[in-house]
Image: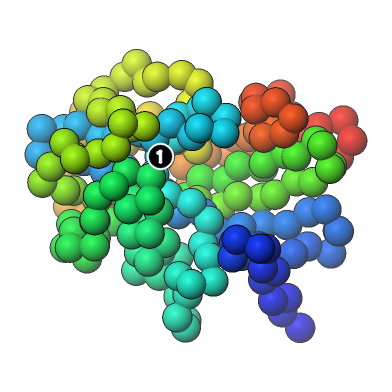
Amino acid sequence: MSQMPEKESLGDLFIPSKEALERAVISPRVILCDPRGNFILVLHQETGWWGLPGGKNKLVDLSGEENSLSTGAFPTLQREVSEEVGIDISPYLLASSGCLGLTEIFSVNSDIGRITHVLSPIFVCMVPDLSGARQNTTLLTSTPFPGPLFPDARIALKYFVEKMKTKAEGPIIPEFLNQGEVFYFQMKPTPRLLMGPPPWA
């Protein structure tokens, strides 16, 4: 029997595990690009770390049989980019976007001893102008990236910049962007990249 996603007070959808303090979540992210090659990062006020626009699927984003590696992620991306960046990307998602690949990060809350397996489909979306972005964002054209940078963003942007250098033509073929690496990132009490699973796991 399949498990139903759990709902939290803010509507985030988590897929529970047999273990009480383990769960998984789908958290689509997007690399927004303009014709000049700029892309955007968002400063997350709670942590002081930079990341890609996007976030967890919420109940309001789902309408039926969604595929989060395809158009099923678009309602989440539209809502999150509007909230975080202040840009409406809905006209551009269907016309000029594709899924770059998937990142996997184990998000650790050491305060309560919980690990969340975060699966982030990373999209690329071309928009005509990024000048209207909010002040909590920064425009970049290449490396070096600002720090500190969330591991899913670092993985995706490194891959994206390498692809841009090769100027590959044709459709984007999604890949597993971790390339075999496993990342544990502690969110609480202090945001930091861990060298492996926490000692209590």
**Residue closer to the observer: 29 or 58:** 58
Q: How is the image coloured?
A: rainbow
Q: With 90 as the anchor, is 128 left or right in this view?
A: left
**Image spot of residue 157 (x, y percent):** 37, 33
Badge 1, how many Cα within 10 Å: few under 14, some, many 20+? Answer: many
Q: Amino acid at mark 1?
A: Leu
- Is residue 120 visible in the rendered image? The answer is yes
Residue 23 in which image quadrant: bottom right
**For the C terminus, which image quadrant?**
top right
Q: Residue at x 50, y 32 (%)?
A: 45
Position of residue 161 relative to residue 180, above or below, is above
The quarter of the displayed image where residue 72 is located: bottom left
Q: Residue at x 28, y 56 (%)?
A: 98
**The N terminus: image quadrant:** bottom right
Residue in front for this viewpoint, 34 or 48: 48
Residue 167 showing in the rendered view: no
Residue drawn at the location 37% of the way across and 20% of the way down:
145
Q: Position of residue 80 (x, y in %)?
A: 40, 53
Q: Position of residue 66 (x, y in %)?
A: 45, 75
> Residue 148 appears at what percent x and percent y?
50, 21
Residue placed at 67% from the left, 42% from the top? 106
Residue beneath label 1, please? 52
